Image (tube, rainbow, N blue to C red):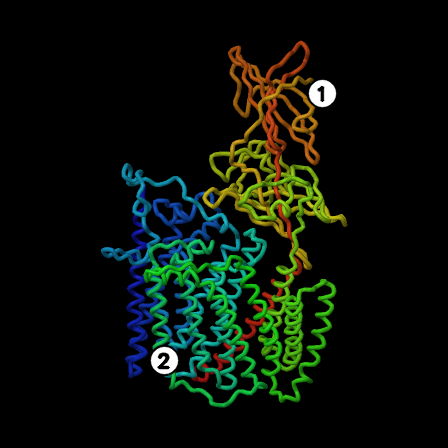
Amino acid sequence: MIHTTIGDIGHLFVIISFVAALISIFNFYKAEKSPLPEMQKGWMKNGQITYIVHGLAVFGIVITLFTIISNHYYEYFYAWSHSSKVLPVEYIISSFWEGQEGSFLLWSFWNVLLGFVILLTNKKWAPSVMVSFSVVQAFLASMILGVVIGDLKIGSSPFILLRDAMDAPIFNINPDYVPEDGTGLNPLLQNYWMVIHPPVLFLGYATTLIPFAYAIGGLWKKDFKGWVRPALPWALFSAAILGVGILMGGYWAYETLNFEGFWNWDPVENASLVPWLVLVASIHTMITYKKSETALKASIILVLSVFLMVLYATFMVRSGVLGESSVHSFTDLGLSGQLLLYLLSFLIISIVLAVVRWKHIPSTEKEVSTYSREFWIFMGATLLCLMGFQILLPTSIPVYNSIIQSFGGISNLAPPADQVGFYTKWQMWFAMGLAILSGTGQFFWWQKMKKSEVKDSLLMPILITLAISALIIVLAGMTNIPYILLVIASVYTITANAKIFFKIAKSNYKLSGGAIAHMGIGLMLLGILFSTGYSSTISLNETGLLLTNSEEVEDNFNQENIPLFINDPQTMGEYTLTYKGRFYESYDGGYVKASYLADTPSENDKIVKRKIKREGESLKKGDTLKVYGANHYYKVDYLHADGEKFSLFPRAQINADMGGLISSPDIRRKFTKDLYTHVSSVPDPTQEIEWSEPKEMEVTFGEKFFLNDFVTVLEEVKRVDEIEGEKLKGNDLAVRATIKVYGDGEDYILNPYYLIRDNMAGRIPDENREIGVKLNIENIKPESNTFTLSVRTTQKDYIILKAIEMPFINLLWIGTFVLTIGFGMAIFRRYSEFYKMKRKGLE
């Protein structure tokens, strides 16, 4: 049965949300323009009602779509495309925003909540701010409207039926056909970080609208100064949330992807970073304006630019213009025209308002001194914008090509081939300058200094910096000049801001948010430098084996990957590695060896083949165990030269649609360095094994013989009444052999059967993929008490592993935490200032 009603309800909610957003625009506009307080109050009430209706409709869309996904209604294209029955609850949640429609809805959901907050907390600015909110919500609702008028398509509905989205012959035969299961979630998104990273990132995107809306409101109302105070706490909150969201994405990449790092300068990564850099620059100019009434025009330009950058990033990521230049971008759903209209509408509004009001915006003619706080803040903001500009220009190359081609031209511009090297080369020098400015600027910010006082203030931090830097450079054996300079600059910003912090904390620690945030930046720069500049591959192949002659792998693949055979210890630097086999992760936690489990029609349901001892309740033969069947874990035991022992479980999925092997690392974390490991190649567990031609051998009880280079013993042959749970018939006769194979670290048991039924012999072989053996009982000779075994062999189980040491990467994560604390303190301070003014009736 097709559940069409719930989809119809969902689509109705979309239409209501779109119409209510349009009416809200009109109501809030009239409230802002009404000359009389009574009229303004009436229109404002209407606006609140229509916005609440809009918000409730958005909540209805969210509930309806999640109901469709969680109940596996695969008659709907969105549910079928992004989820499956085998996904656990957390990944069902992730599948909600995997597609474009779901992520637009997530963005709209956050905007609704933020709009409610504005309505409750700032009645003075609510009408003008809510006009911008309502316009954005109308655009977002149009993205999932799914209405077709002639040849014009407006939005892509998440409630479209599969039969309407696909032209498949099955629907001509049976229009009510519903697939048994969905296609599932992208394997790379099956990670707990994907449950929290997208909501946090989209909350960051959503919050950039608030400072933008205040700035637009200020220009519209000609209140060129008043918008800064309420906008500043939100700008800080936005920078904190967006920054955390970006770094969550970096941590997800570090834990999930195998490009051996946390940032790959992918166009989608860059598209999120540029708005954050400009946002941080705008915060500094806004703070400067509040302190000295300078940089107001710069603040307006930067605040407007942040939201426009978010819209530009949205266009790049979702229009399909990036093509194959990014692995993260969405496919084009035919929304590129709407996305471009979305961007151009706000771009034109911003430019027109800024140009019309420009000469009326207050500015100071006072010349800024090199020794003033304004000079150093402006220099820092300028450098942040230059960092963003340098990233944006190459990232936008696909956009340039698309524009040229749309006018009939030909463009062969290509993004940098080595994007990591290209961006790093430039951004390293920007980072040095930023570190120096963030350290020096704090002294000018907190105290007015004359030229003669600069030396006394900076001398101690500089001396401490040189001493600490010299120690780091010597201990690390650094010779690379840019790296040395970056270390000095990073240590300087930490020591300089530490001095400021201790000075401020004595009087009022609540004012120290900026110093703490800048110290976090210094720690992050050190973590980035050492983890990327001084990472080293330790899985050097010294076996003499050629791992592959394929031209599709990296040139150094054979040199930087090590082969590990099952239970065969292998030396890797200071470690001795032993591969222990393929495992599954169970729903209730822990890993279970794959060879101990038998497959069922359900990928996530396995039958236990033997008794398994576990912490808590043990498993017995025949039990059903729930596992994450798509994920294969490869256990590797490590023994360090100093006696330390641990195990790592790098993960892999086999997905033909995504190029075959998709590997994710497992990481051994220490304070000084991470050991980052991933599999580069594994036997495909889903493929049929190619066994050798059978060879026969005669054995007797207790006799030792070799199977695929393993010592083996026939322990017993026992008569049985059933085979694999099936009772034998009356005249049937069956025996089961117990053959023990001695492995280096584990023994294996094989149980082939010999069956006589209706005077005919039947043979049921047993096999073990790990040791590459398949055998059956070919014949039994009672007179000599011997047994003829038929043996087939194949390559015993193995993996090809890559291991990298990432020194001091934890400084990056610690710095992130410190930066977030600094932002939090600054947010609290600025909101307290705003709240005090509000209580006085000035906001």
Is 426 placed left or right of 808 in the picture? left
The CA span between labels 1 and 2 is 95 Å
Q: Nearer the viewer, mark 1 or mark 2?
A: 2
Is 83 placed left or right of 570 in the picture? left
Q: Residue 105: tell me if it is visible.
A: no
x then y, percent, for residue 220: 35, 80
Which is more toward the observer, 775 or 343?
A: 343
Q: Earlier in the sequence, mark 1 or mark 2?
A: 2
**Is residue 165 depicted above or below 237 in this figure?**
above
User: Residue 102 occupies which quadrant of the picture?
Assistant: bottom left
Residue 703: which disc?
1
Identify which residue is drawn at 24% across, 57% down: 149
Q: Amino acid at mark 2?
A: Val
Identify which residue is drawn at 44% across, 45% down: 184
Q: Which residue is mark 2?
A: 355
Which is more toward the observer, 803 or 31?
A: 803
